[in-house]
Image (cartoon, rainbow, N blue to C red):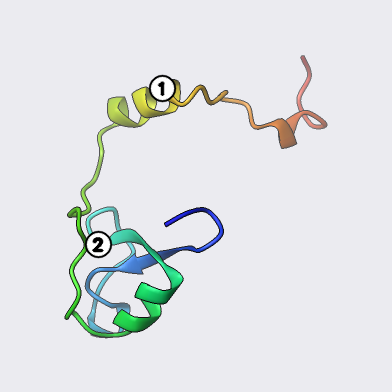
Amino acid sequence: VNESNATMDHVLPVSLGGKTSWDNCTTACKTCNYKKGSTTKMIPKVRPYKPDLWELINRRKDKGFSLQHPSWANYLSE
């Protein structure tokens, strides 16, 4: 899966009562997501879970992300 073909997949499809939540959503390539459709026959390689705040902060730091997105530059003072 890469940025150009990544989709959000509901492990339990919305049509079967699945919610858009950390515990029910994962990424899948377009081909696999369309192949899975509204079934529960395919399971993700890694079970989705809700990360805590510190995990999100540390992942952001590890990837070198700034807390200010470049697209905000026109709207925020320095």
* Residue on which the image places disc 2: 24
- Of the pair 43 and 8, the residue shown nearer to us: 43
Farthest residue toward the top?
A: 78
Q: Circles 1 and 2: CB distance less than 8 Å?
A: no
> How far from the left and from the top, in percent, is residue 43?
18, 68
Q: Nearer the viewer, mark 1 or mark 2?
A: 1
> How far from the left and from the top, in percent, is residue 13?
28, 77
Q: Amino acid at mark 2?
A: Asn
Horizontally, residue 73 falls left or right of residue 22, namely right
Farthest residue toward the right?
A: 74
- Secondary element at tag 1: helix
Which disc number belongs to residue 62?
1
- Secondary element at tag 2: loop
- Of the pair 69 and 77, the residue shown nearer to us: 69
Residue shown at 20% from the left, 75% from the top = 42
Which disc number belongs to residue 37?
none
- Of the pair 21 and 64, the residue shown nearer to us: 64
